[in-house]
Image (cartoon, coloured by chain):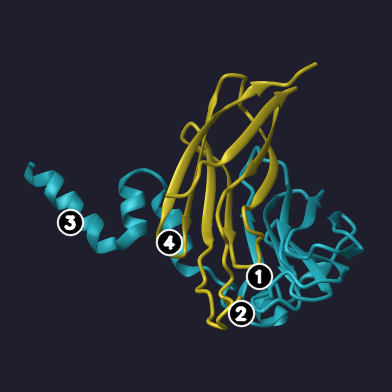
Chain colours: A yellow, B cyan
Amino acid sequence: MANPMRIRADVRDGLTDVRMQVPHPMESGQRKDDKGAIIPAHFITRLEVRHGERVVFSAEFGPSVSANPFLRFRFKGAAAGDRLVASWVDSRGETRSDEAQVAGAAA
Amino acid sequence: MDQKRRQLLHAAGGLGVLGLLVAAGVISPAQAQAAAARPGFDARELDAALAALGAQDASASTELSLAAPDIAEVANAVSVEVKSRLPGTDRIAILVEKNPFPLAAVFSIPEGTQPEVITRLKMAQSADVVALVRAGGRFHIARKAVIVTISGCG
C-alpha cells in the first residue's frame, strides 16, 4: 500500500491554493537494475482532486512525471474547513485516496 | 448478499479496475473512459504525441507562459510551470521533446480552476520542454530549451 499523499490547501480571497506530493516510484520502464534487467514500468496514470462532488483538478500522467509527483494548482469555490479528496490509479491498477481540509491562509 | 448487489459486483468485475473505481465512486464513468483511451501517451516522438492530441496545428501564443530552468542539474525533478491567459482554457499538456515517451502529463482545467499548473518532470537529455494549451477548441504551444547535465531517466 502506497503512503498517504501530503496535501496542503489554503484559501485566501476565495482562491484555494493546493500543493500536493504523492508518494509513488513513478518507474518509467526505462531504468535497469544493477544486474542489467529492466525495472518494469509502474507509474500513476490518473489523479483527480474533488471538492465535494465537483472535480476541481484532474491529471493524466505518463512515465516522465518525477517520482513522488508534486503538483500545485488553484481553484475557486472552497471555504476554510471544507474537505478535498484526492485519488489516483496507477499502471498496475493500484489506487489510493486521501483527504485534506482546506485551511484559512495565515494573514 | 441480495441479487442487486451481486449484479452490481458482477458488472463492476466485467469493467475491470476502472469499473470498480466507478462503482466505488472514486472516479466518474466519463473519467474512466478517458483513462482507457489516453491518446498521445504511447507516442515515441513529439510530433506524433501532438498529432494524437489533435494539436499538430498549434500556434505559438504570448498569452501562454512556460517556466522551466535554463540548466537542470538534477534532471529527475525539473520544475515546470505553465500558465495560460487564454480565455476558455480547459486543457494543459506538458511534453518533453526527447524523452522516450514525450507526453508527460495532460491536465483538465474545469470551470473555476485557474488555467495554471506546476509540476516536476524527468528529462532524459537536453531538450525542449513543450507546453500545450487548449482554449476555445484551439491549441496553443510554447517551448523552452532546458540543458540537462545528468540524465534523469538512466
Q: The C terminus of chain B is located in which quarter?
A: bottom right
Q: How far from the left and from the top, in percent, is residue B29? A: 39, 53
Q: Which residue is mark 3?
A: B10
Q: Earlier in the sequence, mark 4 or mark 1?
A: 4
Q: Nearer the viewer, mark 4 or mark 2?
A: 2
Q: Who comes first in sequence, dot 2 or dot 3?
A: 3
Lateral position of residue A55 relative to residue B32, left or right: right
Residue indicated by mark 4: B33
Residue drawn at (75%, 70%), measured in percent from left and top? Answer: B123
- Residue that badge 2 annotates: B43
Tell me the amino acid under the disc marked 2. Ala
The reply to whether discs 4 and 2 touch (Cβ–Cβ < 8 Å) is: no
Q: Residues within 10 Å of mark 1 (few under 14, many from 20)?
A: many
For marks 4 and 1, give the CA distance. Answer: 19 Å
Q: CA distance from mark 4 to mark 3?
A: 19 Å
In space, the residues marked 4 and 2 are separated at their CA atoms by: 19 Å
Dot 4, how many residues are within 10 Å of its Cα: few (below 14), some (14-19), or many (20+)? few
To the question of a shared chain for discs 2 and 3, the answer is: yes
* Mark 2 Cα shell of 10 Å, populated few (<14), some (14-19), many (≥20): some
* Residue at the image point whose x is 78% and y is 54% from the top: B82
Residue under circle 1?
Answer: B103
Q: Are the residues flagged by discs 4 and 1 from a single subunit?
A: yes
Say whether marks 4 and 1 touch (CB < 8 Å): no
Dots 4, 3 in contact, CB < 8 A: no
Quick check: marks 2 and 3 in contact, CB under 8 Å?
no
Q: Secondary structure at mark 3?
A: helix
Query: What is the three-letter code of the residue carrying label 4?
Result: Gln
Tell me where residue B105 appears, x and y as whole percent: 64, 61
Q: Earlier in the sequence, mark 1 or mark 2?
A: 2
User: What chain does badge 2 belong to?
Assistant: B
